[in-house]
Amino acid sequence: MAKGLMKATGKSGLLPRPKQIFKQPFKHEVYKKPTDTGYADGILHPKKISRDYILPKVSTPEKLLKKSAMVPKREYTDEEISKMPISQQFKIKNAKMRREYLKESYETEVKRLERIEEHVAKIKIEEEKAELENKLHKASRAELYTAPTVESYLEGPLVRPRTDEENEILRSKRESNRLETKLKIDQERANSLFELYNGASNFAITEERLELMVDSAFNNTANESWEYISSLRSSSINATKSDNTFDNEIVNIVMDNVNGGPGFEQVNDYLNGFTDDLQQLADQIKRENNEKSLKEAEKLLDEHQSENKSTETETKTDN
Protein backbone atom coordinates (compact mmCIF):
# COMPACT_ATOMS: atom_id res chain seq x y z
CA MET A 1 0.00 0.00 0.00
CA ALA A 2 1.31 3.44 -0.94
CA LYS A 3 2.59 5.72 1.76
CA GLY A 4 -0.10 8.03 3.08
CA LEU A 5 -2.90 6.16 1.31
CA MET A 6 -4.79 5.51 4.54
CA LYS A 7 -5.35 9.24 4.89
CA ALA A 8 -7.80 8.91 1.98
CA THR A 9 -9.60 6.00 3.72
CA GLY A 10 -7.50 3.47 1.84
CA LYS A 11 -8.74 4.54 -1.59
CA SER A 12 -6.36 5.48 -4.36
CA GLY A 13 -7.05 8.08 -7.01
CA LEU A 14 -8.78 10.53 -4.64
CA LEU A 15 -7.54 14.07 -4.59
CA PRO A 16 -7.36 15.85 -1.22
CA ARG A 17 -9.80 18.61 -0.40
CA PRO A 18 -8.53 21.99 -1.60
CA LYS A 19 -7.57 24.27 1.27
CA GLN A 20 -9.32 27.60 1.63
CA ILE A 21 -7.11 30.56 0.87
CA PHE A 22 -9.09 32.87 3.13
CA LYS A 23 -9.65 31.11 6.44
CA GLN A 24 -11.23 34.29 7.80
CA PRO A 25 -13.63 36.80 6.19
CA PHE A 26 -11.91 38.87 3.50
CA LYS A 27 -14.21 41.90 3.79
CA HIS A 28 -16.16 43.72 6.48
CA GLU A 29 -19.84 42.92 6.80
CA VAL A 30 -22.65 44.51 8.78
CA TYR A 31 -23.63 42.10 11.52
CA LYS A 32 -27.35 41.58 12.06
CA LYS A 33 -28.27 39.78 15.22
CA PRO A 34 -30.79 37.00 14.56
CA THR A 35 -34.04 37.24 16.46
CA ASP A 36 -34.57 35.19 19.62
CA THR A 37 -30.85 34.58 20.13
CA GLY A 38 -28.40 35.46 22.88
CA TYR A 39 -29.09 36.12 26.56
CA ALA A 40 -32.33 37.77 27.64
CA ASP A 41 -32.36 40.86 29.80
CA GLY A 42 -31.83 40.10 33.45
CA ILE A 43 -30.20 36.73 32.74
CA LEU A 44 -26.57 36.44 33.83
CA HIS A 45 -24.12 34.96 31.37
CA PRO A 46 -21.25 32.60 32.29
CA LYS A 47 -17.87 33.95 33.24
CA LYS A 48 -15.17 34.37 30.61
CA ILE A 49 -17.87 34.48 27.94
CA SER A 50 -18.93 37.64 26.20
CA ARG A 51 -22.57 38.57 26.36
CA ASP A 52 -22.49 39.96 22.85
CA TYR A 53 -21.45 38.24 19.66
CA ILE A 54 -17.73 38.64 18.90
CA LEU A 55 -17.18 39.44 15.25
CA PRO A 56 -14.46 37.40 13.53
CA LYS A 57 -11.29 39.14 12.47
CA VAL A 58 -11.23 40.32 8.87
CA SER A 59 -8.15 39.46 6.83
CA THR A 60 -8.19 41.45 3.61
CA PRO A 61 -5.96 40.44 0.67
CA GLU A 62 -3.80 43.52 1.32
CA LYS A 63 -3.15 42.43 4.92
CA LEU A 64 -2.31 38.91 3.81
CA LEU A 65 0.08 40.23 1.17
CA LYS A 66 1.85 42.44 3.70
CA LYS A 67 2.09 39.51 6.09
CA SER A 68 3.28 36.76 3.73
CA ALA A 69 4.90 38.69 0.85
CA MET A 70 6.00 42.04 2.19
CA VAL A 71 7.03 44.69 -0.32
CA PRO A 72 10.77 45.40 -0.05
CA LYS A 73 11.80 48.70 1.52
CA ARG A 74 13.94 49.53 -1.45
CA GLU A 75 13.27 48.91 -5.12
CA TYR A 76 16.40 48.03 -7.07
CA THR A 77 16.83 49.13 -10.65
CA ASP A 78 17.79 46.71 -13.41
CA GLU A 79 21.29 48.16 -13.52
CA GLU A 80 21.77 47.58 -9.79
CA ILE A 81 20.40 44.05 -10.03
CA SER A 82 22.77 43.20 -12.91
CA LYS A 83 25.77 44.14 -10.73
CA MET A 84 24.68 41.79 -7.92
CA PRO A 85 25.77 38.14 -7.59
CA ILE A 86 23.64 35.54 -9.39
CA SER A 87 22.29 34.12 -6.12
CA GLN A 88 21.13 37.56 -5.00
CA GLN A 89 19.57 38.26 -8.41
CA PHE A 90 17.67 34.95 -8.18
CA LYS A 91 16.34 35.80 -4.69
CA ILE A 92 15.10 39.24 -5.79
CA LYS A 93 13.43 37.92 -8.97
CA ASN A 94 11.93 34.97 -7.11
CA ALA A 95 10.48 37.25 -4.38
CA LYS A 96 9.01 39.58 -7.01
CA MET A 97 7.47 36.69 -8.93
CA ARG A 98 6.03 35.24 -5.71
CA ARG A 99 4.39 38.58 -4.81
CA GLU A 100 2.84 38.90 -8.27
CA TYR A 101 1.50 35.35 -8.34
CA LEU A 102 0.21 35.57 -4.77
CA LYS A 103 -1.56 38.85 -5.51
CA GLU A 104 -3.13 37.34 -8.64
CA SER A 105 -4.31 34.26 -6.73
CA TYR A 106 -5.88 36.44 -3.99
CA GLU A 107 -7.72 38.53 -6.58
CA THR A 108 -8.99 35.42 -8.37
CA GLU A 109 -10.19 33.91 -5.09
CA VAL A 110 -11.97 37.15 -4.15
CA LYS A 111 -13.79 37.18 -7.50
CA ARG A 112 -14.79 33.54 -7.05
CA LEU A 113 -16.16 34.12 -3.55
CA GLU A 114 -18.06 37.20 -4.73
CA ARG A 115 -19.67 35.17 -7.53
CA ILE A 116 -20.72 32.54 -5.00
CA GLU A 117 -22.20 35.22 -2.73
CA GLU A 118 -24.13 36.74 -5.63
CA HIS A 119 -25.47 33.33 -6.61
CA VAL A 120 -26.55 32.53 -3.03
CA ALA A 121 -28.18 35.96 -2.68
CA LYS A 122 -30.02 35.47 -5.97
CA ILE A 123 -31.35 32.09 -4.87
CA LYS A 124 -32.43 33.56 -1.54
CA ILE A 125 -34.30 36.40 -3.29
CA GLU A 126 -36.07 33.92 -5.58
CA GLU A 127 -37.08 31.75 -2.61
CA GLU A 128 -38.42 34.77 -0.73
CA LYS A 129 -40.31 35.88 -3.82
CA ALA A 130 -41.86 32.43 -4.28
CA GLU A 131 -42.78 32.28 -0.59
CA LEU A 132 -44.41 35.71 -0.82
CA GLU A 133 -46.38 34.67 -3.89
CA ASN A 134 -47.61 31.57 -2.07
CA LYS A 135 -48.76 33.70 0.85
CA LEU A 136 -50.55 36.19 -1.40
CA HIS A 137 -52.10 33.51 -3.56
CA LYS A 138 -55.86 33.26 -3.21
CA ALA A 139 -57.58 30.09 -4.25
CA SER A 140 -60.36 30.46 -6.80
CA ARG A 141 -63.87 29.13 -6.29
CA ALA A 142 -63.25 26.25 -8.65
CA GLU A 143 -60.11 25.33 -6.73
CA LEU A 144 -61.88 25.58 -3.38
CA TYR A 145 -64.82 23.42 -4.45
CA THR A 146 -62.86 20.83 -6.43
CA ALA A 147 -59.65 20.41 -4.38
CA PRO A 148 -59.78 17.19 -2.33
CA THR A 149 -59.69 17.44 1.44
CA VAL A 150 -58.53 15.06 4.13
CA GLU A 151 -62.13 14.29 5.02
CA SER A 152 -62.93 13.35 1.44
CA TYR A 153 -60.01 10.92 1.43
CA LEU A 154 -61.13 9.33 4.71
CA GLU A 155 -64.75 8.94 3.63
CA GLY A 156 -64.08 6.53 0.78
CA PRO A 157 -61.97 3.36 0.72
CA LEU A 158 -58.21 3.82 0.95
CA VAL A 159 -57.62 1.21 -1.77
CA ARG A 160 -59.47 1.24 -5.07
CA PRO A 161 -61.66 -1.86 -5.40
CA ARG A 162 -60.94 -4.18 -8.32
CA THR A 163 -63.25 -4.27 -11.28
CA ASP A 164 -65.02 -7.43 -12.46
CA GLU A 165 -62.51 -7.81 -15.28
CA GLU A 166 -59.55 -7.50 -12.88
CA ASN A 167 -61.14 -10.03 -10.50
CA GLU A 168 -61.59 -12.46 -13.39
CA ILE A 169 -57.95 -12.04 -14.46
CA LEU A 170 -56.77 -12.56 -10.86
CA ARG A 171 -58.91 -15.68 -10.52
CA SER A 172 -57.52 -17.06 -13.79
CA LYS A 173 -53.95 -16.43 -12.64
CA ARG A 174 -54.54 -18.15 -9.31
CA GLU A 175 -56.20 -21.12 -11.02
CA SER A 176 -53.32 -21.35 -13.51
CA ASN A 177 -50.74 -21.29 -10.69
CA ARG A 178 -52.69 -23.93 -8.77
CA LEU A 179 -52.94 -26.24 -11.79
CA GLU A 180 -49.26 -25.72 -12.61
CA THR A 181 -48.25 -26.62 -9.04
CA LYS A 182 -50.56 -29.66 -9.08
CA LEU A 183 -49.14 -30.82 -12.42
CA LYS A 184 -45.59 -30.49 -11.12
CA ILE A 185 -46.43 -32.54 -8.00
CA ASP A 186 -48.21 -35.20 -10.09
CA GLN A 187 -45.22 -35.46 -12.43
CA GLU A 188 -42.85 -35.92 -9.50
CA ARG A 189 -45.12 -38.62 -8.07
CA ALA A 190 -45.33 -40.35 -11.47
CA ASN A 191 -41.55 -40.29 -11.83
CA SER A 192 -41.17 -41.79 -8.35
CA LEU A 193 -43.77 -44.46 -9.20
CA PHE A 194 -42.03 -45.43 -12.44
CA GLU A 195 -38.70 -45.52 -10.65
CA LEU A 196 -40.16 -47.86 -8.05
CA TYR A 197 -41.89 -49.99 -10.71
CA ASN A 198 -38.76 -50.37 -12.83
CA GLY A 199 -36.64 -51.11 -9.78
CA ALA A 200 -39.08 -53.79 -8.55
CA SER A 201 -37.48 -56.31 -10.90
CA ASN A 202 -34.43 -56.31 -8.65
CA PHE A 203 -36.42 -56.86 -5.44
CA ALA A 204 -36.39 -60.22 -3.63
CA ILE A 205 -40.11 -61.01 -3.39
CA THR A 206 -39.93 -64.78 -2.88
CA GLU A 207 -37.59 -66.97 -0.83
CA GLU A 208 -36.16 -68.60 -3.96
CA ARG A 209 -35.34 -65.19 -5.38
CA LEU A 210 -33.70 -64.13 -2.08
CA GLU A 211 -31.57 -67.30 -1.92
CA LEU A 212 -30.53 -66.83 -5.55
CA MET A 213 -29.50 -63.23 -4.91
CA VAL A 214 -27.56 -64.19 -1.77
CA ASP A 215 -25.75 -67.00 -3.61
CA SER A 216 -24.88 -64.74 -6.53
CA ALA A 217 -23.57 -62.10 -4.13
CA PHE A 218 -21.28 -64.49 -2.20
CA ASN A 219 -20.18 -66.97 -4.87
CA ASN A 220 -16.55 -67.48 -5.82
CA THR A 221 -16.88 -65.73 -9.16
CA ALA A 222 -18.00 -62.51 -7.47
CA ASN A 223 -15.14 -62.76 -4.96
CA GLU A 224 -12.62 -63.32 -7.74
CA SER A 225 -13.97 -60.33 -9.65
CA TRP A 226 -13.79 -58.17 -6.55
CA GLU A 227 -10.21 -59.27 -5.81
CA TYR A 228 -9.25 -58.55 -9.42
CA ILE A 229 -10.76 -55.07 -9.32
CA SER A 230 -9.23 -54.26 -5.91
CA SER A 231 -5.77 -55.31 -7.15
CA LEU A 232 -5.89 -52.88 -10.07
CA ARG A 233 -4.34 -49.45 -9.82
CA SER A 234 -6.34 -46.29 -10.41
CA SER A 235 -4.73 -45.75 -13.82
CA SER A 236 -5.54 -49.28 -14.99
CA ILE A 237 -9.12 -48.99 -13.68
CA ASN A 238 -9.59 -45.84 -15.73
CA ALA A 239 -8.16 -47.63 -18.74
CA THR A 240 -10.68 -50.52 -18.57
CA LYS A 241 -13.34 -50.48 -21.25
CA SER A 242 -16.82 -49.41 -20.18
CA ASP A 243 -18.50 -48.85 -23.55
CA ASN A 244 -21.54 -50.85 -22.48
CA THR A 245 -22.16 -48.76 -19.37
CA PHE A 246 -21.59 -45.49 -21.21
CA ASP A 247 -23.95 -46.48 -24.03
CA ASN A 248 -26.61 -47.54 -21.54
CA GLU A 249 -26.34 -44.24 -19.69
CA ILE A 250 -26.68 -42.29 -22.96
CA VAL A 251 -29.78 -44.31 -23.89
CA ASN A 252 -31.28 -43.75 -20.43
CA ILE A 253 -30.74 -39.98 -20.67
CA VAL A 254 -32.07 -39.66 -24.23
CA MET A 255 -35.06 -41.97 -23.74
CA ASP A 256 -35.76 -40.69 -20.20
CA ASN A 257 -35.44 -44.17 -18.74
CA VAL A 258 -35.58 -44.74 -14.99
CA ASN A 259 -33.85 -47.77 -13.44
CA GLY A 260 -33.47 -49.35 -16.89
CA GLY A 261 -37.17 -48.94 -17.75
CA PRO A 262 -39.40 -46.33 -19.38
CA GLY A 263 -39.95 -43.11 -17.45
CA PHE A 264 -42.98 -40.86 -17.13
CA GLU A 265 -42.09 -38.67 -20.13
CA GLN A 266 -41.63 -41.70 -22.37
CA VAL A 267 -44.96 -43.24 -21.34
CA ASN A 268 -46.72 -39.88 -21.66
CA ASP A 269 -45.36 -39.41 -25.19
CA TYR A 270 -46.56 -42.89 -26.11
CA LEU A 271 -50.06 -42.26 -24.75
CA ASN A 272 -50.29 -38.88 -26.49
CA GLY A 273 -49.25 -40.39 -29.83
CA PHE A 274 -45.99 -38.48 -29.99
CA THR A 275 -43.96 -41.70 -30.15
CA ASP A 276 -46.03 -42.97 -33.09
CA ASP A 277 -45.61 -39.65 -34.91
CA LEU A 278 -41.88 -39.79 -34.27
CA GLN A 279 -41.74 -43.38 -35.54
CA GLN A 280 -43.69 -42.44 -38.68
CA LEU A 281 -41.35 -39.50 -39.30
CA ALA A 282 -38.31 -41.76 -38.86
CA ASP A 283 -39.81 -44.35 -41.26
CA GLN A 284 -40.56 -41.63 -43.80
CA ILE A 285 -37.00 -40.27 -43.61
CA LYS A 286 -35.64 -43.81 -43.91
CA ARG A 287 -37.89 -44.50 -46.91
CA GLU A 288 -36.82 -41.27 -48.61
CA ASN A 289 -33.16 -42.08 -48.00
CA ASN A 290 -33.66 -45.59 -49.43
CA GLU A 291 -35.38 -44.19 -52.52
CA LYS A 292 -32.63 -41.64 -52.96
CA SER A 293 -29.90 -44.26 -52.63
CA LEU A 294 -31.81 -46.56 -55.04
CA LYS A 295 -32.01 -43.82 -57.66
CA GLU A 296 -28.31 -43.10 -57.26
CA ALA A 297 -27.54 -46.82 -57.66
CA GLU A 298 -29.71 -47.06 -60.80
CA LYS A 299 -28.01 -44.00 -62.22
CA LEU A 300 -24.58 -45.49 -61.57
CA LEU A 301 -25.73 -48.78 -63.15
CA ASP A 302 -26.96 -47.00 -66.28
CA GLU A 303 -23.69 -45.12 -66.57
CA HIS A 304 -21.74 -48.35 -66.16
CA GLN A 305 -23.86 -50.12 -68.81
CA SER A 306 -23.45 -47.21 -71.24
CA GLU A 307 -19.69 -47.35 -70.74
CA ASN A 308 -19.69 -51.11 -71.41
CA LYS A 309 -21.72 -50.63 -74.62
CA SER A 310 -19.35 -47.94 -75.84
CA THR A 311 -16.32 -50.16 -75.22
CA GLU A 312 -18.02 -53.08 -77.07
CA THR A 313 -18.76 -50.91 -80.12
CA GLU A 314 -15.18 -49.67 -80.17
CA THR A 315 -13.80 -53.26 -80.11
CA LYS A 316 -16.16 -54.29 -82.94
CA THR A 317 -15.05 -51.39 -85.14
CA ASP A 318 -11.42 -52.26 -84.48
CA ASN A 319 -12.00 -55.87 -85.54
Image: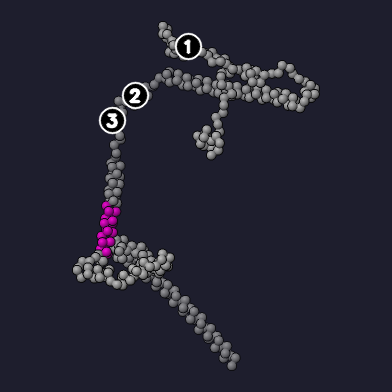
- Pointer 2: residues within 10 angstroms few (<14), some, or many (20+)? few
Against 188, residue 107 (above or below) is: above
Q: Foreground: 227 or 308?
A: 227
Q: Horizontal and vertical percent for residue 272? A: 29, 62
Q: Horizontal and vertical percent for residue 178? A: 27, 49
Mark 1 = which residue?
Answer: 48
Hey, what amino acid is under mark 1?
A: Lys
Q: Residue at x 80, y 24 (%)?
A: 83
Q: Quadrant of the C terminus?
A: bottom right
Q: Quadrant of residue 12?
A: top right
Q: Foreground: 3 or 102?
A: 3
Q: Foreground: 268 or 60?
A: 60
Q: Which segment is the magenta one?
A: 182-199
Hey, what amino acid is under mark 2?
A: Tyr
Report helix, strand or loop for mark 3.
Answer: loop
Report helix, strand or loop for mark 1.
Answer: loop
Instruction: Give yes or no for residue 224 being in the magenta stretch.
Output: no
CB atoms of marks 2 and 1 within 8 Å: no
Q: Foreground: 308 or 125?
A: 125
Which mark sits nearer the N-terminus, 2 or 1?
A: 1
Mark 3 = which residue?
Answer: 156
Q: CA distance from mark 3 to mark 2?
A: 18 Å
Q: CA distance from mark 2 to mark 1?
A: 62 Å
Q: Is residue 78 visible?
A: no
Against 148, residue 187 (above or below) is: below
Q: Residue at x 71, y 18 (%)?
A: 72
Mark 2 = which residue?
Answer: 145
Which mark sits nearer the N-terminus, 1 or 3?
A: 1
